[in-house]
Image (cartoon, rainbow, N blue to C red):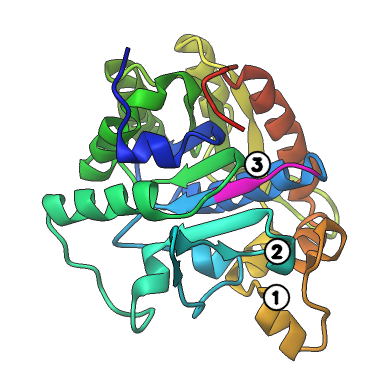
C-alpha cells in the first residue's frame, strides 16, 4: 500500500485527474485544456472542475479564462483557487500567472524550483471536492512532467491523460514522444485530439486543410489509442479565448457577474462557437474512458 503524502491528502477528494500533453508548442494544448475544463463543467450542473496551469514559463490559462490580473488569496487551509464562474465556485483555476507582479514578467527557474512550485500547487491549494482536475502542462516531456508523475504517484488509479497534436508531420513525430512518455510512466491515455485540422470558411463552409489531414487519426489507430476527434481552426474561438472576460471584467462592462452555470458568460459565449458541438462530442468520448476508482474520498 502506498504511504500517504501531503499531496495525496490534499487531493483525496479529487475523483479524476486529467493531464493534457503535447509533444511541441503551438499545437493549441492550452486552448484544448481550457475547452476541456469548460466542457466538463457544462456536462452536468453538479460537476466541479479545477484547472491547474503548470506551464510555468508560459502560463496562458488565466488569460483564456478571463482571469488575468486576479490575485491569489491565502486562507487557513491554503491557497484559494480563482473561480472563473464567480460565486458559483464550480470552476477553480490556479496558475503561476496569478503570482507574477506583471504578466509580462519572465519565469527563469531551474528544475528544483519548478518542482517545488508544482508540489505547492498540488499540496497547498484548497481544491476541495472535484470531479475533475485538468492539468495543463508545458510542451514536451521535461521537469514539470516528471515532477507531476512523482507527486501524483499515490493517485495512479485516478490519473489519465489526453495528447494534443496537429496534422503536421513534425507535430506527429513529437506526439509520439508523448506516447512513449505515457508508456514509460504507466500513465493511461484517454485519447488523442488532432487540433488545427483545417479551416472551415464561416461564410461558405468550405473546408481547407491548412497543413494536412488525417495524421492524428492514423497515428491513434497505429498506436492503439482512442481518436477523440479533429478540431478545425475556429476564428471565433480564437477571438473568445484571446479576449475572455472573467466575472469582474464582465461586471464592469455591464454583464452580470456569474452566480451559477446559467449565467457563466464565458461558457455561454463558448457554447455559441462552431467548436462547441465538436468538443462536446470529444469530451463525451473521453469520459467513457476515464478510469473508475473508489479511492477518492467525497
- The majority secondary structure of the magenta stretch comes to loop
Question: Where is residue 18 drawn, in percent x and y?
Answer: 51, 34
Q: Earlier in the sequence, mark 1 or mark 2?
A: 2
Residue assigned mark 1: 247
Image disc number at residue 85: 2
- Find residue 198 and report its image quarter: top right
Q: Indicate left or right for 24 with 235 as reference.
A: left
Question: Where is residue 200 drawn, in percent x and y?
Answer: 73, 50
Q: Which span is picked out in magenta?
A: 46-50
Q: Indicate left or right for 16 with 233 as reference.
A: left
- Find residue 268 and report its image quarter: bottom right
Distance between mark 2 and mark 3 Cα atoms: 25 Å
Distance between mark 3 and mark 1 Cα atoms: 28 Å
Image disc number at residue 157: none
Residue assigned mark 3: 231
Do residues under tags 2 and 3 come within 8 Å of each other at their CB atoms? no
Eye-nearest disc, 2 or 3: 2
SS label for mark 3: strand
The quarter in which the N terminus is drawn is top left
Q: Earlier in the sequence, mark 2 or mark 3?
A: 2
Q: Indicate left or right for 201 with 52 as reference.
A: right
Q: In the rendered view, tell whether residue 268 sits above or below residue 246.
A: above
Tell me the crowding category of disc 3: few under 14, some 14 to 19, or many 20 or more residues within 10 angstroms, Cα based: many
Do residues under tags 1 and 2 come within 8 Å of each other at their CB atoms? yes
Distance between mark 1 and mark 2 Cα atoms: 7 Å
Nearest to the observer: residue 249 or residue 27? 249
Amino acid at each position: 500500500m502506498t504511504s500517504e503524502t501531503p499531496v495525496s491528502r490534499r487531493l483525496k477528494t479529487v475523483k479524476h485527474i486529467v493531464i493534457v500533453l503535447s509533444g511541441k508548442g503551438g499545437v493549441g494544448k492550452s486552448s484544448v485544456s481550457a475547452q476541456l475544463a469548460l466542457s466538463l463543467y457544462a456536462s452536468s450542473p453538479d460537476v466541479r472542475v479545477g484547472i491547474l496551469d503548470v506551464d510555468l514559463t508560459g502560463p496562458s490559462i488565466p488569460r483564456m479564462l478571463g482571469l488575468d490580473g486576479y490575485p491569489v488569496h491565502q486562507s487557513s487551509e491554503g491557497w484559494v483557487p480563482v473561480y472563473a464562474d464567480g460565486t458559483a465556485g464550480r470552476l477553480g483555476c490556479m496558475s503561476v500567472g496569478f503570482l507574477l507582479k506583471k504578466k509580462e514578467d519572465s519565469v527563469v527557474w531551474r528544475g528544483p524550483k519548478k518542482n517545488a512550485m508544482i508540489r505547492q500547487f498540488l499540496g497547498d491549494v484548497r481544491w476541495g471536492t472535484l470531479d475533475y482536475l485538468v492539468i495543463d502542462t508545458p510542451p514536451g516531456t521535461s521537469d514539470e512532467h516528471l515532477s507531476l508523475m512523482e507527486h501524483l504517484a499515490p493517485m495512479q488509479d485516478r490519473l489519465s491523460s489526453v495528447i494534443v497534436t496537429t496534422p503536421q508531420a513534425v507535430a506527429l513525430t513529437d506526439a509520439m514522444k508523448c506516447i512513449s512518455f505515457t508508456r514509460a510512466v504507466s500513465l493511461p491515455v484517454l485519447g488523442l485530439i488532432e487540433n488545427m485540422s483545417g479551416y472551415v470558411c464561416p461564410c461558405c463552409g468550405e473546408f481547407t486543410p491548412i497543413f494536412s489531414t488525417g495524421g492524428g487519426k492514423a497515428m491513434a489507430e497505429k498506436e492503439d489509442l482512442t481518436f477523440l476527434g479533429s478540431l478545425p481552426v475556429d476564428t471565433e474561438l480564437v477571438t473568445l479565448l484571446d479576449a475572455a472576460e472573467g466575472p469582474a471584467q464582465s461586471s464592469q462592462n455591464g454583464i452580470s457577474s456569474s452566480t451559477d452555470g446559467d449565467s457563466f458568460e464565458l461558457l455561454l459565449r463558448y457554447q455559441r462557437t462552431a467548436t462547441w458541438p465538436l468538443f462536446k462530442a470529444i469530451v463525451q468520448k473521453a469520459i467513457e474512458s476515464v478510469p473508475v476508482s473508489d479511492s477518492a474520498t467525497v
